Image: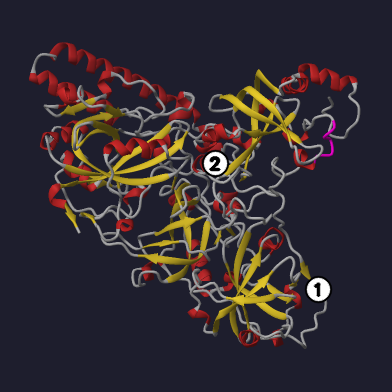
Amino acid sequence: MSTMEDNSSCSSAGTALSQASILQRTFERLSSTQCLKVSTEAPVAVIALQRYLSEQPEGQSNSYSYDVTVTDGLWRAKCFVHPGLNHLVHTNTLRTGTDVSITQCSFVYNERRLGHGYICIEKLRCGGERSALLPRIQDVASLPMMVKHGMERSVVLQSDVPLQVNRKHYLSLWNNEDPEGDIWTSGSLSSDTVLDVSKISLLSSLESCFRNTWKPLPLLVKIIHKSRVRYYGKFGLKIDFPFQAYFEVADQSGTMSLVLWNELCPEFYQRLSVGTVLYIQNYSLKQSYSNRSHPQMDHHRIKTFHSVEICLNARNPTSVITVVSPKSVLPQWGLPEVSYQFITRSELDELSNNSACDVIGLVTFVGRVERVKSKGNKEKYWTYRWIHAVDGSSDRPFILEVFSSSQPEVFSSISPMTYLVCTQMRVCRVEGSLPYLTSSFETETFITGYHKGQPYVSDPRVKSFIQWTKTLKDNVVLQKTAVGGHYCYPRPPQKFTQSMADASAQVPLVAVADLKEEMETLQYRERKKVAIQGQIAAVRYMKNPKSTESKRTDEREQGPDVAPDVCEPNTLDHPSAAQQTTATSSTAEKNSVKEIKRRIQTRKVMRSYLNLRSMTAKRRHADTEEGKEQEEEESDSVSEDAPIVTDSQQNQDSDVISWESSSWLKQKQEVSEHLCEGGLHQDSLSQRFTFDEKHVLLQRSNLQPTHWTPEQTADTPAPVVCPGYYQVTILGINKQMAVDAAFLPIVSSDEPRAIALPQDPHGNTMLSCLSSGFLCPLSDTASPGQSKLPKPGEVLGTAGELEDMHLVCILDLCHLGEDKVEVLISKVYRGTDVSLD
């Protein structure tokens, strides 16, 4: 057996490698075993995990297959993941950047093709949070790829193509819209060729020749809108590249839809932009597909032709697409200018529901990327994130629900302090909430670094926004930024209504027994919202959210965020000096080390002293009402004055304040199951943005990448200091099952979740806090003289009113990876607040 990619004989150096290589020894055992299957113990690191449509028979549950590339530090091996292990990918347990131990594998030959076969991993054990092996490898890409003797010419094993050879390309790991792999060509292909435009067809003439045999003349058009890519692959479809993308193109006579089909999408999609001029030959026409979305183009004020659309194919006929160089475009061609409809935040409140608009703003909050199932498809997911952006016209930001738009590099790089442009956003109005904007199929997003050459840079509204940013100071804006954490918008309505007529327009009301299945079937970063009926049986105040991360040093945990130097932003693609700051520590940081250490030591002493006081108070007053009150006071004191960093796993007695209904002690012995998997995790909390930690903050809030890069081993951000949260035990209405859910009340107007929060005053009872979602009044860092928020003991002191009260609880579920499931209460409804429609 040979593993040399260049088919050369093994040298003495290669022999030494094979003796030390775990992968090599496993490969040799596979070749010598008669049954082509071995049990082994091969510790390796995962450097790539790639998805594609399966070649399975119809009716099986796994529509997608996965290839995994692993390394032992000496060799790389591209292997097939047995479908029985797919759930490890779905939960992000098997992922890039970690170590795994392969315990059983086999070699699979392709019986219908000569010289092709691959390793199938059938059993494995997943390792810890991070790989211990990868940081020691200087250049993973330079490691030789392992190939079985006689299969050295197998392109599949050594290129960006699936191991199951009937599939020609990979899909994005977490959605079907993002271009993935080497087949997607980028870069310019504009031509300076002199074009004969004396004989062309105008778009207005195409409708009349649609049903004629006359061969249409070439087209000369400009792209004015671009949709995201649509993947329509499914088992049994004999198309190698089942993609399509819509463009709206225009000439002097009007606009019409143009469709890029199949293999032309990987070749041209990323090269064609809004504003690009095309000279098109050998196209076909077909009747327009009526059941598709269209961009709103009234602002262009040119005629739109809807009856037919232009089709570009790789064959029958073979379309010829020429991208015209911008300097070759002549005014006499009469091509219209690209038009936008930018609005300011102050104008948003006047727009009607579903109106289209374009926006530009300075990003202040970026939520974590989450996934939601596409309606009617159990295995198709949309990826999205929530964003706040300000433009100076209002004290409120744009609230943006931005879905992936086939621009993965942009989508994953959105961060606070960047200039964000979103086109063709749609207005969403929900009763009881401020209007927000959501993506359409034609939305495109652009951030700092991607604005150059875009037609909107000359728009007056954009220029006005740039002038406003020149008045800002980065260190002031940074104090209002945040990244990641749980975020839900719009908030649940004031009344819960179960509509029998339209079940899709509501939060589904599920049995508590079904909640277990809802939680177990969640996939990585999948988000669901459900409602359950029951009563609150117990509430505990807890200070330490769950965390699986390794414990950091006290200096890292307690170190302050150091803002960059004050600078003024100037243009879209030339950020301020603060945005260009590297991770190198500033002089101010170095000078503050002694102060940081002093504060850390003070915190340690204070924490030990308060805990000692608390335990002493318990011993002294355990049997008196006065002692109990003092114990609560001491515990609250610890929470208020010396918050515990959230990655601590320890829970001391002084950290817990609780309430239980009078019947819970008996009831919990009778419940058939108590779901305790959910709760508050480190990933549930948003963090202040800093330029020094930009990369690792974005890495945490993005989805797990397909390919490992050295940057993945960067330091984790400082844990979030959280004053505490409430763990609420909900007993189902039939008292057969119970579930624990976390309640994290909003306590500050600076939190991203506080935006657009109805802040009607309430009495800070446990019930009113659960109903409203916040403590009253919200604190404000700009007004430190405000009255203090109630302490946890004071809130829990009112929990008695929850006794035997029938409630409807709205739960937000999100799978955070591995076995971590976030279960948060977003609102509870009393019986007077629910109705049947």
Pick whichever, 769 or 247, lies toward us: 247
Q: Amino acid at mark 1?
A: Asp
Above or below residue 351? Residue 722 is above
Above or below residue 359? Residue 830 is above
Q: Which residues are magenta?
A: 150-154
Q: Amino acid at mark 2?
A: Asn
In the displayed structure image, the side of residue 338 where residue 189 appears, left or right: right
Above or below residue 341? Residue 137 is above
Q: Residue at x 43, y 48 (%)?
A: 481
**Which percent across, then down, holds residue 408?**
59, 52
Pick whichever, 184 or 785, lies toward us: 184
Residue 445 among magenta residues = no
Rounded to the nearest angstrom, the CA distance separating label 1 from label 2 is: 48 Å
Whether residue 311 is visible to the viewer of this picture, yes or no, is: yes
Q: Quadrant of the C terminus?
A: bottom left
**Which percent across, then down, holds residue 712?**
60, 35
